[in-house]
């Protein structure tokens, strides 16, 4: 097997399984990338009023909605916010009120395949990392309840931190 053979084999691979128009006029792009439970990641592309980036590739909040459905609040802790921020920065993705997106200029439209991969990768990474952080917290909570002193201290610290963040979140909502 040679590199040219591999290139020829994968050249027919498509990043779009299905494409259709949704109510707001954007195109829904069903990607071959899958969530943890097996559903495919949908991304959306549409026009926006921006001279330098007339197109936008977005998940339309699908990542945040997915986590919310699993009873995981994306912004509940500083650690989750940091995880989300680090992933977005490393992949060139913008987070805007729970929506993940990549602005695309006219000249950059030919790089749409790369943007689809980057945004899909960000959605998958954010879902998995935040889900794992929540799972670790639940495990620590369970061990604390079973009497492990070190985990009791960790649990109390995390609960205090979560209560503080919830209060900050409530105050921010009042200001909006």
Image: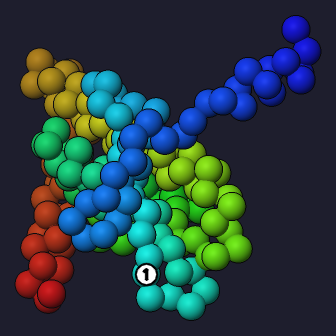
**At 47% from the left edge and 70% from the top edge, which residue is drawn?**
56
| Residue 161 seen anywhere in this rendered image of the structure | no
Q: Quadrant of residue 46?
A: bottom left
Q: Quadrant of residue 171?
A: bottom left
| Residue 15 seen anywhere in this rendered image of the structure | yes
Dot 1, crowdedness within 10 Å: few (<14), some or many (≥20)?
A: few
Q: Which residue is mark 1?
A: 48
**At 25% from the left edge and 70% from the top edge, which residue is drawn?**
24
Task: Describe the element under mark 1 as helix, strand or loop.
Answer: loop
Whether 57 is drawn above or below 162: the answer is below
> Which is nearer the eye, 150 or 116?
116
- Residue 2 position, x and y percent, is 91, 15
- Asked if residue 45 lies left or right of residue 152, the reply is right
- Asked if residue 127 lies left or right of residue 107, the reply is left
- Residue 99 position, x and y percent, is 33, 64
**At 19% from the left edge and 22% from the top edge, which residue is drawn?**
143
Q: Quadrant of residue 166?
A: bottom left
- Asked if residue 145 lies left or right of residue 18, the reply is left
């Amino acid at each position: 097997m040679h590199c040219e053979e591999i290139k020829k084999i994968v050249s027919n691979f498509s990043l779009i399984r299905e494409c259709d128009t949704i109510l707001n006029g954007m195109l829904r792009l069903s990607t071959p990338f899958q969530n943890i439970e097996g559903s495919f990641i949908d991304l959306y592309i549409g026009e926006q009023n921006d001279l330098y980036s007339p197109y936008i590739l977005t998940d339309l909040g699908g990542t945040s909605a997915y986590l919310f459905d699993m009873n995981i609040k994306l912004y509940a802790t500083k650690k989750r916010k940091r995880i989300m921020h680090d992933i977005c920065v490393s992949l060139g993705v913008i987070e805007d009120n729970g929506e993940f997106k990549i602005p695309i200029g006219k000249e950059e439209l030919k790089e749409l395949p790369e943007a689809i991969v980057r945004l899909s990768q960000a959605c998958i990474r954010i879902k998995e990392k935040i889900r794992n952080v929540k799972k670790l917290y639940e495990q620590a909570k369970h061990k604390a309840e079973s009497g492990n002193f070190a985990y009791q201290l960790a649990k109390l610290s995390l609960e205090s931190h979560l209560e503080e963040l919830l209060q900050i979140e409530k105050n921010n909502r009042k200001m909006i």
